Amino acid sequence: MRTLTLDIGNTTVKYGCFEDYVLRETVTVQTKGQVSEVVERWKPAHVILASVAGPTDAWAADLRTRVPGRIVEFKPASTPLPIRNGYATPQTLGADRLAAAVGAAWLRPGRDSLIIDAGTAIKCDWVEGGHTFRGGSIAPGLRLRFQALHTFTGRLPLLEMPPDLTAEIPLTGDDTESAIRSGVLNGAVAEVNGMLDQYRALRPALGVLLAGGDAAFFQSRLKGPIFVIPELVLLGLHRILVHTIDYVEE
């Protein structure tokens, strides 16, 4: 069975083509037309779509004209899940966070996992025992930190991420730009490592899964064993799609 997962962001769409539970292809695209080309080429039987950028009604309506099976618009507060959602306000929960939690539970059944999703925001989310999403923390991502320093001060320049994400960032900046880079980049690493220390004190056997667009920056800078799973959200969406189909058919 062929299925398609769509993770719709504010500026891009990341898709995953699955065949018999195996992720065969994943790419980030810019337009709805590019997604249409994927649908025509892949010919999925079912599709799931999740968005942090607003309603998915228009996307779903378009897909229903070309996909024979089920179109699932993932909504954290109402879509059936293969794990328990322990979040107090599911109606405010980002679909990407919950999908990543489902992916972590599938990859690490029966075990505690901490998801670090380093993108526009840096999110640390705990999946307890491989069966319950407990929530976590949300902090500004690296680019937001650079932007905030520029926007809310009078003279600080707007800096970009360094071209070499693995290069050492000097602890002590000897000019304004290097001082900003140290504060933003070294500060973010220290922050995430501090969260890791606290979670590991609570759950020593905790497994850490790293995802998101800035995963490459954090990968070599975080303490302890870290599993880099770039497609964690897509894996979770696929598990939710399969669970939803089984749930409806029952």
Image (cartoon, helix red, strand yellow):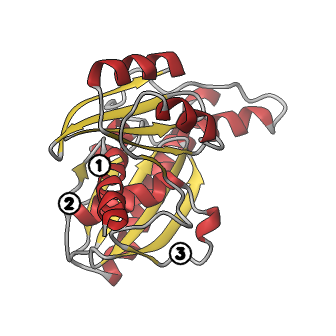
Between residue 208 and residue 48, name the one nearer to us: 48
Instruction: Answer with the quarter of the image where residue 224 lies.
Output: bottom left
Q: Is residue 20 left or right of residue 72?
A: left
Between residue 115 and residue 197, name the one nearer to us: 115
78 over 234 or under it: above or below:
below
- Label 2 sits on what residue type? Leu
15 over 87 or under it: above or below:
above
Q: Compare marks 2 and 1 and give the one earlier in the sequence.
A: 2
> Quarter holding the C terminus?
bottom left
Kind of element beneath mark 2: helix
Residue 170 pos. (x, y %): 43, 36
Disc 2 marks which residue?
A: 107
Disc 1 marks which residue?
A: 235
Disc 3 marks which residue?
A: 87
The answer to the question of whether label 2 and label 1 lie on touching residues, with beta carbons closer than 8 A, is yes
Q: CA distance from mark 2 to mark 1?
A: 9 Å
- Label 1 sits on what residue type? Leu
